[in-house]
Image: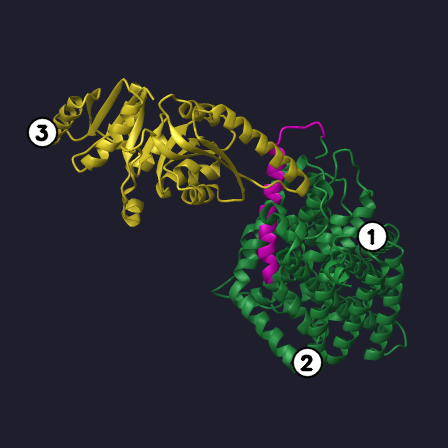
Amino acid sequence: MVEWGQKNIVFLASLVVSLAVIILGIGRPDLFEAISGWLHTRILDNFGWGYLLSSLFFLVFSIGLAVSRFGELKLGQDHEKPQYGYFGWFAMLFAAGMGIGLIFWGVAEPLSHYTAPPGNLDPRSGAAAAFAMRQSFFHWGLHPWAIYIVMSLAVAYFSFRRGMPPLISSCFYPLLGERINGPLGYLIDILSVLATIFGIVTSLGLGAIQITSGLAAISPLPDVFATTLGVIAIVTVLFMISSLTGLDKGIQMLSKANIILALLLLAFMLIVGPTVYILSIFTTTLGQYFSNLLEMSLASNPFEGYDWTKSWTMFYWAWWISWAPFVGLFVASISRGRTIREFILGAMLVPTLLTFVWFSVFGGAGLHLQIVSEVDISGQVAENVSVALFQLFEHYPLSNLLTLITVLLLMVFFITSADSATYVLAMMTSNGELRPANWKKIVWGITVSTTACILLFTGGLEALQRMAITAALPFAIIMLLLCYCLWLGMSYELSQPPGPNPDK
Amino acid sequence: MQNFIFPVHPGISTQKLWNLAHFAGIFQPEKIYLLLVAPPQHSRQLAWLKELEQEMADQGLPVERLLRQGHIPSQITAAARTTRSTICFIKKWKNPLKMALAGSVVSDVVRMSDEPVLIHKKSLTSAASEQLLTNVMYATSFKHTDEVCVRYIQHPAFKAKRLVLLHVGRRAPDPEAEGKRREQVNANLEDLARQCHNGFETIEKKEVVGLGVARKILRHARLSNIDLLIIGKIDSNGLFSSFTGSTAEAVYNSAPCSVLVIPGGR
């Protein structure tokens, strides 16, 4: 029993802490709200600049690694080939990294920035529209992927190439040595598990709300809590089935189906929607994005618009960092056999490009309705962000079908995210076992779904999201150290003369 | 160690200078140069130098005075290069603020010199003992400087009771590679110990893992009660190290003992 406890110390400690936080959220939502609000405000107020600097550093570091001599190293032994083909790999990358978020914010974010830009811009002006698109590209572009890349690269390098368990603590071996198997290592892994749980519960909760809104738009089902509960229950059963079938089949199959569905939706909107307007927005914003990249990356705007930066850019950066353990571990697990250069360029450029197209199509169509067709869609979005996409569809042919496809898309993204999350959680709490026990997947799956239901009921979902963002602060530091460890490990490897065994 | 060069000035401690001269004398040098870098027509300083030269010559030391003008570290390194001499400094405590503002001649010479630099901190010789030194530490990086440094340690006049060979290494990225690295380090230390054999009573081999090489060398020099720390200097081409300086430069200033910095070239 003692031996079992020692082996499962990360599992037990994470379960106890997450349950304690969740019980606090259920039992004393006011206190939970107050604590999370205080932490969130303090962190963003005092360390927002740190998020901007570290995110830019991760981007520069990733690009630097890709173009350096380290880029030729393989995430695995030298003879290994990638486990997944490009399409499957990109599909899973996209599903885990962005998924629900893109559908949720694809229309809503540009419209939100358009109607409520920082103080130095006039709301609903041309400048505000350009700003809205540029910032949407910025928030969902290269930086989030660079954050994910740093985490997943470190895990993939130390586990697949150096033969260590796929855990975040393993990456600290060059710095901590055998102490990674002690309290410090456990602390890093427990923190990763907690950030993953808080993040995934929040994301699933928000996803369930949007699915419910979509269903209410096309069916007689009412947009009430009971419907959301039903959605979560069905999706939980589905993702548990997918999870128990294993990574190779479940997630890959669903992700591929989803990316095809998403591309179809994208193509339909591009063709049926204001095509030239969308392409024009894409071209202009792409140019503005790259020419303003450095300025946007470091714009904390202390003189004007600080509150805007805090509630959008800094919030996003913290959110991506808090998601990094989950996405990082998942992306690492699907990237074995690729070279570092291929991994970085692939994971950074392809999803970013797809994201830009997505925002141009949906955000552009939304702005077209608002500016050219003079339909006040932004007012409706301001009232309820989750209905933004469905409101847009109402102005296009086959709106019910589009809504149905979107609901399906959301459900599949929901399933793939929850599936990957339960897999990652089970892996992290099984000392990095690549084939974790099914019962652990079930425990985490049920914990995540139940928590999402309960917090949706008590209204503690936003508070939990703030807790996830709170976890981003230690994680930003952990990730900076990860970069250092990665550099130590790779430079050590390249400093060694080629031995008889080229694999090590 | 054929020649030595002592940068001197009238404020120097005569007692310490004699200690240093005694230390140098054991190596039976061909010449000991007393170098004074002073402005021209500084007759008082010149007179002091002549007096010092005479005193040392009377004691049978092969001294010769050198008088130079200009940038002090450049003159010292240039004189050492032309005379192929080991530069010997007497280290005295310097206010860190003053050092930060005005710089340090020793620092500059350690950085610029292609000849060995000895920074004398406490008496290197014991009159009561035939032994030149008690505890010597050689901090090795297993690089090409080993070859140069070992030549000094093997010098017939170089005597000590105990030699500590210290290697501060960087941990390998995984336990298996780390095990292999340790094996290699032990083999290297063993090999080095064989090469350094020069009548030492004991040769200790130590390996420390971690970052902050200079800090770790200093810690072990302190713990092992070292009299003389020998360290090789490699001029790095790296951008980062061109700002931070070499380990040798970082070590000499805080060392609790005398330090011999031996340049190994690029």
Displayed quadrant of residue A438: bottom right
Q: Which element is circle 2 on?
A: helix
Q: Nearer the viewer, residue B125 or A415?
A: B125
Q: Quadrant of the N terminus of chain A?
A: bottom right
Task: Name the residue carrying label 1.
Answer: A435
The answer to whether residue B27 shows anywhere in this view is: yes
Residue position for label 2:
A29
Seen at 52% across and 30% down, the residue is B142
Q: Amino acid at mark 2?
A: Pro
In the rendered view, would you say B89 is above or below A266?
above
Q: Report in which chain the residue with disc 2 lies.
A: A
User: Residue A43's spot in the image, x, y percent?
Assistant: 56, 67
Q: In this orientation, which residue lies closer to the viewer: B28 or A23?
A: B28
Asked if labels 1 and 3 share a chain, the reply is no
Residue furthest to the top in view is: B30
Q: Quadrant of the C terminus of chain A?
A: top right
Q: Identify which residue, A429 or A466, lies in the foreground.
A: A429
Q: Is residue A481 magenta?
A: yes
- Mark whose residue sits in front, 1 or 2: 1
Task: Write the residue at 70% across / 41% down.
Answer: A162
Q: Which mark is residue B43?
A: 3
What amino acid type is highlighted by mark number 1? Arg
- For marks 1 and 2, the one nearer the N-term is 2
Q: CA distance from mark 2 to mark 3?
A: 87 Å
